[in-house]
Amino acid sequence: ISNVNETSVNLEWSSPQNKGGREDVSYNVVCKRCGASDLNRCRSCGSGVHFSPQQNGLKSTRVSITDLLAHTNYTFEIWAVNGVSKQNPSQDQAVSVTVTTNQAGKLFIIL
């Protein structure tokens, strides 16, 4: 579920259905700020955006992101990682969602 307001977003997701027999799953969140007319033109959000409890190594399936710019498109990628992820990187480990700040509503994300 994603709750969005002018400068913050709360993301919540489901853990992977198949953990590959591993229990050491954690999550990393990538934030990208995207162009108003071209969502394919994105760049890193930078250090001004804050994540609670943290951006990387999340053990829970939720994160609050604050200090976003109002009326701006953001894409968030949520990466599921474990102790062997670096040995076999795959796009299947991530899900992404694009939101526009200052919109009300909920989004459902399944990872």
Image (cartoon, grey):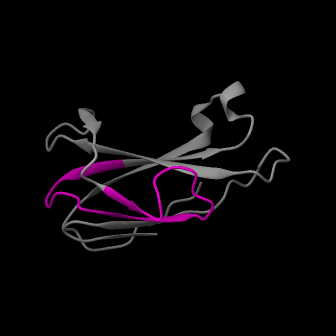
Tell me if residue 18 is in the magenta stretch: no
Percent across and percent down for residue 6 are: 18, 68
Percent across and percent down for residue 30 are: 42, 44
Tell me if residue 74 is in the magenta stretch: yes
Looking at the image, residue 53 sits to the left or right of residue 111; the answer is left
Q: Residue at x 22, y 51 (%)?
A: 73
- Number of numbered discs overlaid on the protein picture: 0
Q: Is residue 3 above or below residue 65?
A: below
Looking at the image, residue 26 sits to the left or right of residue 94; the answer is right
Q: Can residue 88 be seen in this view?
A: no
Q: Give the range drawn in magenta.
A: 50-75
Q: In this view, does 57 lie above or below 1?
A: above
Of residue 43 and residue 109, the one placed in the foreground of this image is: 43
Q: Is residue 21 visible?
A: yes
The C terminus appears in which quarter of the rendering? bottom right
Q: Residue at x 24, y 51 (%)?
A: 48
Q: Residue furthest right?
A: 21
Rendering quarter of residue 87: top right
Percent across and percent down for residue 81 are: 64, 43
Looking at the image, residue 56 sits to the left or right of residue 83; the answer is left
Rendering quarter of residue 99: bottom left
Rendering quarter of residue 94: top right
Percent across and percent down for residue 105 are: 32, 73
Q: Residue at x 14, y 44 (%)?
A: 36
